[in-house]
Amino acid sequence: MTKDKRALRQLATQFVIYGKTLYRRLDDGMLLLCLNRTSVDLVMREGINIIGKISPKSSNGHEFILVSIDYFTKWVEAASYEVHFKADVNTLLQRYGIQRHRSSTYRLQTNGVVKAANKNIKRILWRMIETSQDWSEKLPFALWAYQTSFHTFIGATPYSLVYGMEVVLPIKINMGSLRVALEQHI
């Protein structure tokens, strides 16, 4: 048997077809859906946006928030910045050969996901702050609230889509669930 045939035969043991759908079999027996090129392009899309100029500035001088969202899981990452960094972002995109797609404010189908995430993060953030200048310190907590909240549009939490399980909050650890007991080897 040639090397190519042997390699193909070995590779074929890692896949299974149910109906007309191809799955990859993991070592633990879990099956992952194999995607076609069109589906991959939809799943791998991300949106990046800048919120700002926020007034008043935060206590550390920040007045912009860079927001990035994964369109598939709705996972959001955000960081606050002191200055507008458009030139830095353009340099980064060019360095790594990332195609930039600008969307119009009037085309909600292209930027609606980012716009909705921005609105929700701002709403959570403004409810958490005590003074108008501590918003950048509360940003990580607002992101955590967003990641662990149920989103009806996707029917799950972004956290569960990224990590494959629901988050165990510190309050739940005291209640003693089976998962926590197994993780702590109790």
Image (cartoon, rainbow, N blue to C red):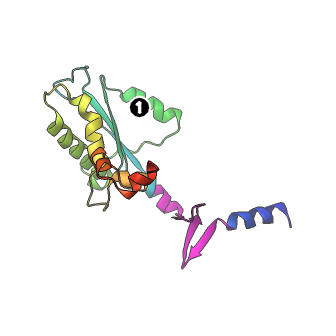
Relative side of 58 to 94, left or right: left
Asked whether 14 falls inside the magenta stretch, the response is: yes
Depth check: give the residue in front, 96 or 168.
Answer: 168
Name which residue lies at 24% across and 26% down. 63
Whether residue 7 is visible here, answered yes or no, is yes
Element at label 1: helix
Q: Quadrant of residue 121?
A: top left
Is residue 104 among what the camera can see? Answer: no
User: Which residue sits at x=17%, y=25%?
Assistant: 133
Residue 13 horizontal/vertical position (percent): 68, 67
Name the quadrant of the N terminus.
Answer: bottom right
31 vs 143, left or right, is right
Q: Residue at x 20, y 23 (%)?
A: 57
> Which residue type carries mark 1?
Val
Describe residue 16's horizontal placement relative to residue 80 as left or right. Answer: right
Q: Residue at x 28, y 60 (%)?
A: 153
Q: Quadrant of residue 51?
A: top left
Q: Is residue 132 magenta?
A: no
Q: Which residues are magenta?
A: 13-41
Could you tell me residue 148's position as x and y percent? 30, 49
State the residue lying farthest toward the right. 1
Could you classify mark 1 by the number of other residues whose Cα lies within 10 Å: few (under 14), some (14-19), or many (20 or more)?
few
95 to 116, vertically: above or below: above
The relative height of residue 76 versus residue 19 in the rendered view (above or below) is: above
Q: How many marks?
A: 1
Instruction: Read off the residue under disc 1.
Output: 89
